[in-house]
Amino acid sequence: MRHKKSTAAGQRERIQVLTRYEASSSELLERALSETRRMRIQADDVLDALVALVTAEAPTGMLGSLIGQPSRDQHGLPMEMVYRDAT
């Protein structure tokens, strides 16, 4: 991304990418910003949630990890940053 997610240009950049995976991303963002009861919701927080949605919906084979072997929490779950592979 060339722009910060807190800027209008950065939000447009992210929505353009998110729409490839979730067609209603733009509408979800607008709806969250206009209909929320939380007074100070920020667009970048909604974008983070949309990225989490798109990543969570990805088939396991389409996920990449930022590190090789992740450490594990007290329950044995891996603690890692994952992303949806675009390839």
Image: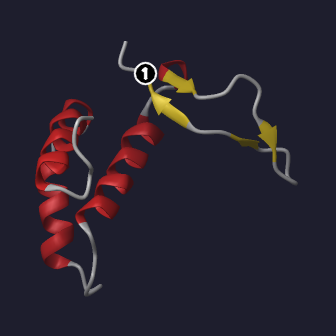
Query: What residue is rendered at 53% in x and 18% in y?
Result: 61
* Corner quadrant of residue 41: bottom left
Quadrant including the C terminus: top left
Q: Quadrant of residue 6?
A: bottom left
Chosen colour scheme:
secondary structure
Number of marks in picture = 1
- Identity of the residue drawn at 44% across and 31% down: 58
In the image, residue 53 above or below residue 59: below
The amino acid at mark 1 is Asp
Where does the image place residue 42, in percent across and percent down from the top left? 26, 70
Q: Which residue is at a point 82% across and 50% down the rendered structure image?
A: 73
In the rendered image, which residue does mark 1 sit on?
A: 85
The x, y position of residue 26, in whole percent, is 13, 50
Camera-side residue of 44 and 54: 44
Residue 82, image quadrant = top right
- Residue lying at the far top in this picture: please name it: 87
The quadrant in which the N terminus is found is: top left
Figure check: 53 above or below 33:
above
Q: Say left or right for 33 vs 47.
A: left
Residue that appears at 16% across and 77% down: 35
Please tell me whether mark 1 sits on a helix, a strand or a loop.
loop
Picture coordinates of residue 40, whole percent (x, y): 27, 82
Decide: few, some or many residues near mark 1? Use Cα within 10 Å; few <14, some 14-19, many ≥20: few
Does residue 51 lie above or below 63 as drawn? below
Tell me: 65 left or right of 17: right
The spot of residue 56 in percent (x, y) is 47, 41
